[in-house]
Image (cartoon, grey):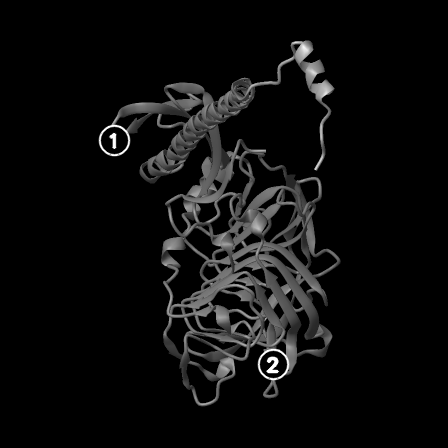
Amino acid sequence: MIKIKTQTTKYLLTTNYKLPTSNGFMLVLVLVFSGIFIVVLSGLIGFVLQQHNAQKVKEKQEQAFAIAEAGLEYYQWFLAHNPGDIYNGQGEGSPGPYEHDYYDPEGGATGKFSLEIDGNISCGEVSSINITSTGWTNDDPMRTKTVFGRYSRPYLTEFAYITDENIWFGVGEDVVGRMHSNGGIRMDGLNDSLETSEKETWICPGYLGCSGNPTMPGVFGNGAGWPLWRFPDNNINFLGMVTDFSDMKAQAISNNTYLPPSLDYLPNAKGYKLIFLADGTIDVYIVINTKKLGSYYLNTIDQHWYYRELDHLVKNQNGYTPKPGIVLDPGCSLVFVEDRIWVEGEVNGKITLISAEIGGGPTEIIIPNNITYVHNDGTDGLLLMSQGNITIPWYSPYNMELNGIFIAQGGRFGRDYYWQAEAGPVKGALTLFGSIINARTGTNAYVNENNVVVSGYQQSINTYDRNLLTSPPPMMPYSSTQHRLIEWREGAPE
């Protein structure tokens, strides 16, 4: 207990000082908290308004994005009815951009999309189409969204290997990329992508290493890639892939890149030798002196072996005579040869080389040496198409490199069975970057009863070239006329 002196109280009273009352104190608190509340409320209202505006902006952006997407979908529909048209149906004199109204089924026209369209064109054919679609709403036209899409027909370059018959990939024969057979497949090598067969079951013959001609599943073997085996699968129609060589010949004649039968020049001619040069031109020679060598080949239709002598060796001295070279047309790098040809060299650019005899044939393409690209970034590409076989002869390099798409339309890609010591029958590795498409079954290796390679390449690696999926060389066959979306991204193309 503490006692207060009375004079202190008297002093306070004499100075007329009054202690604060409770009502005044409450007023101060009310003012303070009211100010705080107003500040908080103002901030909250501002935040709500900001979120509301942001939501409206987001909605407009989403609407603009949906309209831009509708632009891509519209042109995909347009291409289904007008394949290869890159002018929105308005002709070459109207290069775009092309603006269209966007209609909401319930509200009429609510926005617009603008299309910028260009295509990769060679020899008058459109290989792929690039579309940049920009969309906006009518009530906020300054807020736009842009999407990019690339459309292409499904070219056969998406496959590393296609055949119309039964086939065996042995140990050391690897496929990187899709593979398909309209027959059965025995797979003892490696595959890293889908391997499909049209057959649910098939009879595996002795020449594919099966004893007793057993009935086997569509795809079977000891390969580690079995989870990617699919059968039965759709047929790839080789008859539907038959190319109109007459149109190709006419195109080459107009471009001055046509070579008639070599006998038109020399009575002892046996075909042409073409060498691709790094500057993009092609040296041309008429072959006049060859050497024959015996070999065996398998006729997969009657399953019999046949002996033949092939004059595939061009002699080093006086083997050929030069002819004026070929300068390619940048807009249509197509060469048509109505004769047998030997091909090798360095490819610069996208080039298509055809060997076919109109009304005759079949002709043959022989590859005695490496075929490489000057650039490996998709700038270069080669399509070799033969009416008959595409053959790797006995004197090919020990280790061989081939780049390109090799189509043996009525024959096979591969080599015969050679046994002569001078031929050096057993080779090292064959590395192929591209695609093999052949009607008949070809091979690059022959094995004995112990599965040891006795002729051909001990190892082969076939890797598809993804750079040629959408921009292949001219006149590349496709499996469907319908364009499909193969690339999409938000924003304008880089």
Residue 21 is situated, as x and y percent measured from the top left of the image, at: 56, 19
Q: Quadrant of the C terminus?
A: top right
Q: Could you tell me which residue is drawn at 72 percent across and 74 percent down?
A: 424
| Amino acid at pointer 2 | Val
**Frontmost residue, 48 versus 444:** 48
189 vs 384: above or below: below
Which residue is drawn at the image coordinates 63% and 74% (left, top)?
A: 172
| Distance from Cα at disc 2 to Cα at disc 1 | 67 Å
Camera-side residue of 89 and 300: 89
Q: Is residue 85 above or below residue 465?
A: above
Asked which secondary structure carries label 1, the reply is loop
> 222 left or right of 239?
right
Q: Secondary structure at mark 2?
A: strand
Q: How many marks?
A: 2
**Vertical position of residue 222 compared to residue 97: above or below:** below
Q: Residue at x 72, y 19 (%)?
A: 8
| Residue labelled with disc 2 | 447
Q: Residue furthest front?
A: 6
Residue at 36%, 54% (x, y): give it.
240
Q: Earlier in the sequence, mark 2 or mark 1?
A: 1
What residue did someone put label 1 on? 105
